[in-house]
Amino acid sequence: MKHILTTAAAAVIGFGLATGAMAQSALNAILDAGVLKVGTTGDWNPMSLRDPATNSYKGFDIDVMTELAKDLGVEVEFVPTDWKTLVNGVVAGNYDITGSASISPARMKVAGFSDSYLAVEIYPFTTEDKVEMFDGYESINQPGVKVATTLGTTFEGFTKAWFPNAEITVVEAPARGFQEVIAGRADVFVTSNIEGATLTDKFPIVRVPGAEPRAPSPIAMLMPQDDQVWINYVNNWIKVKEAEGFFDRVRADWGL
């Protein structure tokens, strides 16, 4: 009997050790490897912008992730991704964390999120030469109105839900919905107040008159859903950096 109990106890201990090994946190792996891998799309101004000539990135997310890597004492590696594969990449372990993404029920089913540090609102936009065609959301939700959106973004879901009667064009990254409107192939696109502000400064784009903001959404970093050690580290890091004024400075640097 004693031999049986000893064998059973050893088996339990062995299982516990094996389970612990399999459940190693991304935090430990990052520290061991000396590299923080960050998934970023490089196409969301001013959050993440990629320069194809140099393959370098700049933006709010880039500054935040560079600071996170510095405080971890590791290098940062930006891993190119796109909106339709952003969540799959963090689930598959292609990167340890992502830049900013809207928190949504669909994403929460398979991935975890850090605490939020910013919020966005969604508006429809058109070009200056078409602005008189529209007055609020119902004027967009009409047959013959062409609305463009980008595959895999939260904007795709909003576009389909808000404008079921319109003609919807879904483009894949690196193409973007707003580019369809600028090129004259579509009339309207929806995006956040953050990206919208940068586009109206650069292109003849304006908000649709009479269209109030919709879908206020907190944004945060996507992380592995079951890695509470890593999530706790990042959440506490956000609290510390907020208290130090770091996020205020970076938001101001990028006009957020």
Image (tube, helix red, strand yellow):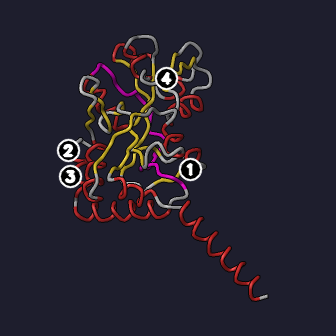
Q: Secondary structure at mark 2?
A: helix
Identity of the amino acid at label 1?
Answer: Met
Q: Is residue 238 left or right of residue 1?
A: left
Q: How many marks?
A: 4
Q: Residue at x 22, y 59 (%)?
A: 245
Q: Who is closer to the viewer here, 16 or 175?
A: 16
Q: Which mark is residue 93?
A: none
Q: Would you say the residues marked 3 and 1 are in contact, meaning their CB atoms lie under 8 Å apart?
A: no
Q: Is residue 38 left or right of residue 223?
A: left
State which region is magenta: 203-225
> Dot 2 corresponds to which residue?
253
Identity of the amino acid at label 3?
Answer: Arg
Q: Would you say the residues marked 3 and 2 are in contact, meaning their CB atoms lie under 8 Å apart?
A: yes
Q: Mainly helix, strand or loop, the magenta region?
A: strand
Q: Secondary structure at mark 3?
A: helix
Residue 226 on image: x %, y %: 55, 58
> Dot 4 corresponds to which residue?
172
Q: Quadrant of the N terminus?
A: bottom right
- Is 222 located above or below residue 138 in the figure? below
Q: Who is closer to the viewer here, 51 or 135?
A: 51
Identity of the amino acid at label 4?
Answer: Glu
Q: Which mark is residue 249?
A: 3
Spatial CA span between label 3 and label 1: 29 Å
Spatial CA span between label 1 and label 2: 30 Å
Q: Residue at x 46, y 44 (%)?
A: 102
Spatial CA span between label 3 and label 4: 33 Å
> Dot 1 corresponds to which residue?
108
